[in-house]
Amino acid sequence: MIRRRSTHLFLLALLVRLIHLAQIRSGPTFDVPLVDGANYFRTASAIASGDLLGGSQAFWQPPLYPYFLALLLRIFGPSMTAIYVVQAAIGALSCLLVYFLGRRLFDERSGLAASIIMALYGPLIHFDAQPLIPVLHIVLLLGGLLFIVRAAGIPEAASSPGREWGLAGLLWGLAVVATPNLLLAVPPIALWGLKRARRPAVPLLFLLGVGLPIAAVTARNLAVSGEAVLISSNGGINFYIGNNPDYDRTIRIRPGGEFERLASEPENLGILGAAARSRYFVSRARDFLAGYPGAAVRLYLRKGLDLLPAKLREAVVLRSPSRNDFHFCGGAWEGFCVRGGAAENFAGDGAAEDFLRDGAAENFRAGGAVPVRRRSPPAPGPRFFTTAKELFAGGAAIRPGLALRKASTSLMVSSRYSPG
């Protein structure tokens, strides 16, 4: 029963993602990686061509996703469709991992409901068809969490907790190499494991597993550049972009002239090493946080509000022609501004200049959305919520086969996200 249900869940999630992929293939940017995606592809192409160390400088961005892309380039060549099909399968696997986690932490029905919601969740479907990190770090994170739960004996004792903790650490370490801020969660997990383990030394295998992938990246950075950069050197500038008195401007800096001017500040001051440049930006951010605590508190309160659902802040749909209102467009979603004259409202905004200059905005406006640079995932489309509501209507038991048919029919008639 569990095997059949798992198969149905995986096929549901995969089918939804493949339908989305088929619908965006004709988009103008489908075969053209943008923003961070372009950087990942440059690094991946070099690795796939034989430069296994990925350059002669410390990694600027976390390297796991470029190495993953390099592997796919070696197998499939420069086929975006093939790459996105693989990512769709990985995204479907993530939905399956949520099912198994839900079963262990709660019950069968909770795991099933969570898995179906994730399978139909618009932002994840969208990012599974983008040349970006989320598809990879999500599956590694969920895999690590599943092994942590198993190792901790939830709900039943593990036959080999040491092995489970080690595998959990290895997956978490790989996730950190994809998204370094996940490293912040390692100490709390280790402390929690020490409290639950019958043998306190066992969860230390988790720390060992985490450390192995990170140590490999650090050793590579040291070998090629002479600097012991832990993972990548862009952490400092990213920290500064989100923590400074000019946050409204820096958070919207796009790759190009303005970003390059900001990134070159330490070099212009004679600060040349990758680690030193990162420390320069961390120092500037700390000066702001320490020197202007009131402004810092207000900034973090604003960021906290950005975590609320967009509908609660009336931020997704722009109803005012004021250009200043765009500063809060999406909050939790700076990806799409939908119908209601949004394209015209920010036609002169720097975030949309490239699209408008190239005429691409007209193509997207016909579908009701204009793409701008994303800082976080877009809100799920209403049809996904409607589908989920139909699946759970009346509290009846869910039949995966029925869910598959309903979801596929729903997605074929719903309006889709445009590629960005």
Image: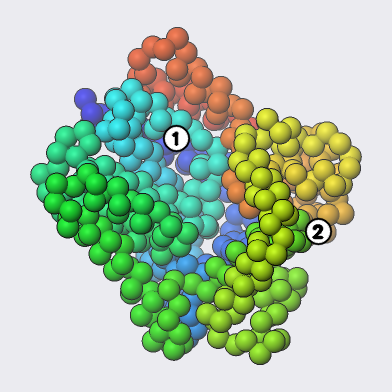
Q: Residue at x 83, y 54 (%)?
A: 349
Badge 2 amino acid: Gly
Seen in the picture, residue 54 relative to 403 is either above or below; the reply is: below
Q: Mark 2 sits on what residue?
A: 350
**Disc 2 residue crowd, few under 14, some 14–19, many 20+, Cα 10 Å:** some
Label 1 crowd (10 A; few <14 / some 14-19 / many >=20)? many
User: Which image quarter: residue 101?
Assistant: top left
Q: Quick check: 102 above or below 263? A: above
- Residue 331 horizontal side relative to residue 64, left or right: right
Judging by the rendered image, the residue that carries numbered circle 1 is 119
Q: Residue at x 68, y 57 (%)?
A: 293
Identified by mark 1, the residue type is: Ala
The image shows a total of numbered marks equal to: 2
Residue at 29% across, 25% down: 107
Q: Secondary structure at mark 1?
A: helix
Mark 1 and mark 2: Cα distance apart in space:
34 Å
Please say whether residue 52 is visible from this viewpoint: no
Q: Residue 391 versus residue 88: which sits nearer the camera?
A: 391
Horizontal relation, residue 315 to residue 20: left or right: right
Residue 149 visible in the shown view: yes
Image spot of residue 222 (x, y percent): 40, 84
